[in-house]
Image (cartoon, grey):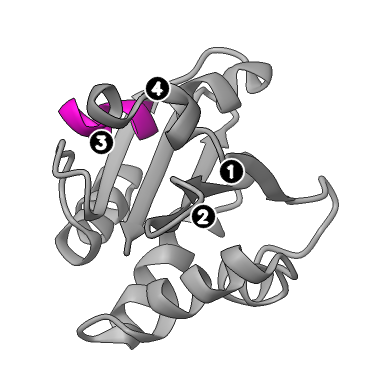
């Protein structure tokens, strides 16, 4: 399966790009430098929230923003296990939702693995999202050696 097909499969389960501000969406972009991955993650988080970002303000939406995981360069690629090992309490509840509380959870885990466990993925980071109150979630960002980047935004109350 090629990169485009794996992203399309991930979008079929977690949703295509959107500004829904609730639920999940998968974005695909080119990020030239690995150092720019967090900036891209913030850009798509803001885009996903759309008007809600402005309505509640940047300070509210960045209240919970932090990197909760970065894959070590030499680490084994197993996104499902990596997500389950995140110890941040707020992030770990979102992990359970992403991996287990969706329709056809097994297909979801396989789609995540197909995208983020690919040998070409050079940088992988997971960020905590939310407003510090009712809304919480995760953003998974993976960038391959050529700059192709897949971002899964997941946000629920």
Label at residue 116: 2
Secondary structure under tag 3 reads helix
Closer-to-camera residue (138/124): 138
111 left or right of 120?
left
Q: Is residue 23 above or below residue 3?
A: below
Q: Residue at x 21, y 44 (%)?
A: 21
58 left or right of 125?
left
In magenta, the rendered stretch is: 44-52
Q: Of discs 2 and 4, which sits in the foreground?
A: 4
Would you say the residues marked 2 and 1 are in contact, meaning their CB atoms lie under 8 Å apart? Answer: yes
State the separation of the CA atoms marked 3 and 4. 9 Å
Main SS of residues in magenta:
helix
Crowding near pointer 3: few (<14 within 10 Å), some, many (20+)? many
Q: Which residue is identified by label 3?
A: 48
Q: Which residue is identified by label 1?
A: 121
Q: Residue at x 57, y 26 (%)?
A: 37
Give the x, y percent position of residue 93. 53, 75
Label at residue 43: 4
């Amino acid at each position: 399966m090629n990169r485009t097909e794996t992203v399309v499969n991930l979008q079929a389960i977690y949703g295509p790009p959107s500004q829904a501000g609730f639920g999940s969406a998968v974005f695909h972009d080119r990020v030239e430098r690995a150092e720019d991955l967090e900036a891209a993650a913030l850009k798509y988080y803001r885009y996903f929230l759309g008007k809600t970002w402005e309505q509640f303000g940047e300070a509210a939406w960045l209240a919970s923003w932090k990197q909760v995981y970065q894959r070590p360069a030499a680490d084994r690629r197993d996104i499902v296990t990596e997500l389950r090992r995140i110890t941040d309490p707020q992030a770990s509840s979102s992990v359970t939702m992403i991996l287990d509380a969706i329709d056809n959870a097994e297909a979801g885990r396989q789609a995540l693995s197909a995208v983020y466990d690919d040998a070409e993925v050079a940088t992988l980071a997971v960020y905590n999202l939310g407003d510090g109150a009712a809304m919480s979630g995760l953003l998974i960002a993976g960038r391959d050696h050529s700059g192709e980047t897949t971002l899964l935004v997941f946000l629920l109350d």
